[in-house]
Amino acid sequence: MDSKSAGRKANLKQYRSVNGRWQFVPVVKSEGKPKPQLVLIDGKPESSKGGGKFYLEWYEDGKRKTKIAGSSPREALDAWQLQSGILAGKAEAPDEPTEDTGDDVLTIDAAIDSI
């Protein structure tokens, strides 16, 4: 682990409606680990059920990065664990999907004609 990645952490938050207004709210942490079943609203823990999607937030080269982490607490926790491992240098980032050029796409008409 290099010195740049030491101490880097990902935060987990949920984008949800609070008092009729959509906003990001922090996920409750216990012993440094997020508990995505609960979020903090006005300083009080509340259930994350019925809320919106979860997001990860971290800093890379001085810039804030945000990435969707799923819509369920399990997906959010899995995404947080992976991102934390990547930032700590203990896990490798998954390969980004390559862009499909469409050259090998077969249209329905072409498939019918080939029969």
Image: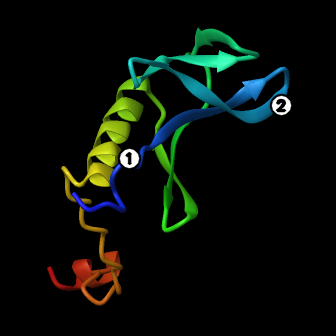
Q: Is tag 1's residue or tag 2's residue first in the polypeptide sequence?
A: 1
- Estimate how packed mark 1 is, as few (under 14), some (14 to 19) or many (20 or more) residues with alpha carbons within 10 Å: few
Q: Secondary structure at mark 1?
A: loop
Camera-side mark, 1 or 2: 1
Q: Residue at x 35, y 26 (%)?
A: 74
Front-most of residues 56 and 97: 56
Marks 1 and 2 sit apart, C-alpha to C-alpha, by 33 Å
At horizontal 49% and vertical 68% (from top left) the residue drawn is 61
Foreground of the two, 98 or 26 = 26
Q: Report the quarter where the C terminus lies.
A: bottom left
Where disc 2 sits, the SS reads strand
Residue 40 figure quarter: top right
> Along the line of sight, which residue is nearer the eye, 94 or 72?
94
Q: Residue furthest bottom?
A: 103
Going by the numbered disc 1, the residue's amino acid type is Gly
Q: Quadrant of the N terminus?
A: bottom left
Residue 23 place in picture, x, y as percent: 74, 35
Image coords of residue 73 (percent x, y): 42, 24
Q: Residue at x 30, y 37 (%)?
A: 81
The spot of residue 53 in percent (x, y) is: 56, 36
Q: Exactly how many numbered labels are in the figure?
A: 2
Badge 1 vs badge 2, beta-carbon distance below 8 Å: no
Give left or right: position of 62 versus 76: right
Q: Amino acid at mark 2?
A: Arg
Which residue does the numbered mark 1 point to in the structure image? 7
The residue beneath circle 2 is 21
